[in-house]
Amino acid sequence: MVHTDKGTGVRTRFAPSPTGDLHVGTAHTGLFNWLFTRHHGGTVVLRIEDTDRKRLVPRSLGGIPEALGWLGIDWDEGPGVGGPYGPYFQSERQELHQRYAEQLVAQGDAYYCFCTPERLAEVRQERQAKNILPTGYDRHCRNIPPDEARRRVAAGEPHVVRLKMPLEGQITVTDLIRGEITFDARTLEDAVLIKSDGYSLYHFANVIDDHEMAITHILRGEDWIPSAPLHVVLYRAFGWAMPKLAHTMLLLGPDRKKLSKRHGATSIQEFRDQGILSEALVNYLAIIGWSWDDKQEIFSREELIEKFDLDRVKASSAIFDHQKLEWMNGYYINHLLTLDELTARALPFLARAGLVDIATVTPGTPAYEHIKDVLALEKDRIKLLSDIPEMTAYFFTPTVEYTPEVLLNKKQKLTPEQVREVLPAARDAIAAGDVADEAGTEARLDEVVARFGLKRGQVFMLVRAAVSGRTATPGLFETLRVLGQPTCLARLDAAVAWVEGRG
RNA sequence: GCCCGCAUAGUCUAGUGGCCUAGGACGUCACCCUUUCAAGGUGAAGAUCGCGGGUUCGAAUCCCGCUGCGGGUACCA
């Protein structure tokens, strides 16, 4: 799919940090970003912000783009597709950042700082305790004469580059979702732009790259609001036009804290392994923090692109509700997926459980059709694809296990003696025809019901237990049909033998 | 501590001065359907619209204060 800029000039970037699997909160922001851009016919840039070499997780370099691909969030420029504004890995743009940092120092908007981490910690602690603004760094090196600073840098003294923030006045940030946010300059610190290892910090790299990549709209998490004034100052120092800003809400765990690993599965990869459909996840993520009206909650991807815009995005954080996600996933499985689509998605889960051999199952083969028939029966009750193996195992295993709780189910109010009498009769009734004929099977079983003067459920449940080894299955006659005559009879015989063995 | 943000049922939300006796969805409960479990259908419980003041004939909706919750406060992103 090629997206061309329709002339709206909207260019956005999604800038994940490769420090682990794609987090659902990151994906949420990414999705909003993507929907906004696609809605406006703009260009999506994927930029990997890998400047923190200590926290870098190499696996995520490939994992994050892959997870985005799974979600159907594509990008027009970035890793894999290239583009005119590369490189798209931030670590490869360090020279550029350095150059701009030098420019800032040269024009007097930034300075070299030689303070040790130890000194910084002390100062911070003291100022915080005494409430001296700003409560962090005391701007100690801001007053070192430029010549002296340059000499010390040349001499190889460890240093960072810090931004000179205005000492007073106000800095106002305009947010597309929240309106104006005003900060008192006296509370703002001289942030580090370039670390002593030469790598730029997020704030700085971000501003430089956003400008260099001609980004027009920045959508990012609410947790970035406090650093927005710093970005404003940076843009001003360079004399660059400020991109439009929009801070999206955070995804929270049940304890109302920022959603994180300690809340359980939070990575997109984990959701996929649980058997969440990407369509359902995208839909669910889209309606948390955004709404269309007071009625609709199910949206196709196309509909989302058509309807999504920032004016209907909420500013308040939301608790991630896995239960509702599962409901939506079930809804997609039950109502929106074709049987072939469901089969394709279910196959890997069945194969992983050892129930089917994926190599021999291709569309058109009997094995494939059997799986399809099984899924047609069970799809109403599937919430997660990962539930399918357990749910459908008895359709694929050669035999089933019996327990007294199932075959001599007390709820059916049948004595073991009655079971020993009725079960063989039911077996014979089924053997008298073919289970492919559901109505015929039902009629013959009804004769058994009448003969013994029982309730239909009592006999049906007995047969259900015998052929499946469980008390909950789809409708009995369709289940028998899909199981097939030989399997049904073999299991009925096994069940008869089992109950007799207990007499 | 300081700075910033947010505030409608357990959860996600609709609502932008009168249509609100606050609508929808998830979850919960009940009933219907029924051979089990689901699905589906119907219905119910659940919100003093965080609190307190204003403004107004009239406020969930506008203003102020408070409280609560969250985020930031790093040579992480």
Image: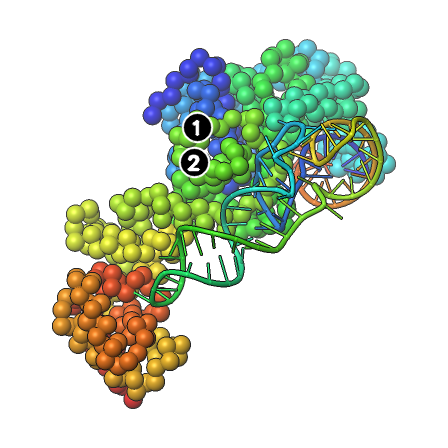
Check disc 2 and give the amino acid type: Phe
Q: In this view, does B16 lie to the left or right of B67?
A: left
What residue is shown with label 2?
Answer: A299
Rendering quarter of residue A154:
top right
Q: Say which residue appears at 37% left-offset and 51% top-offset.
A: A385
Check disc 1 and give the amino acid type: Ile
Residue A168 in view: yes
Secondary structure beneath disc 2? loop
Q: Which of A300 and A93 is in front in this view?
A: A300
**Percent coordinates x, y for residue A241 in the rendering:** 60, 13
Rendering quarter of residue A6:
top left
Rendering quarter of residue A233:
top right
**Percent coordinates x, y for residue A297 in the rendering:** 47, 39
What residue is shown with label 1?
Answer: A305
**Percent coordinates x, y for residue A482 in the rendering:** 22, 60
Tag 1: Cα neighbours inside 10 Å, few (<14), some, or many (≥20)? some
Q: How far apart are marks 2 and 1 (CA)?
A: 10 Å
Q: Residue A115 carries which label?
A: none
Tag 2: Cα neighbours inside 10 Å, few (<14), some, or many (≥20)? some
Q: Which of A8 and A225 is in front in this view?
A: A8
User: Vertically, is A386 above or below A458?
Assistant: above
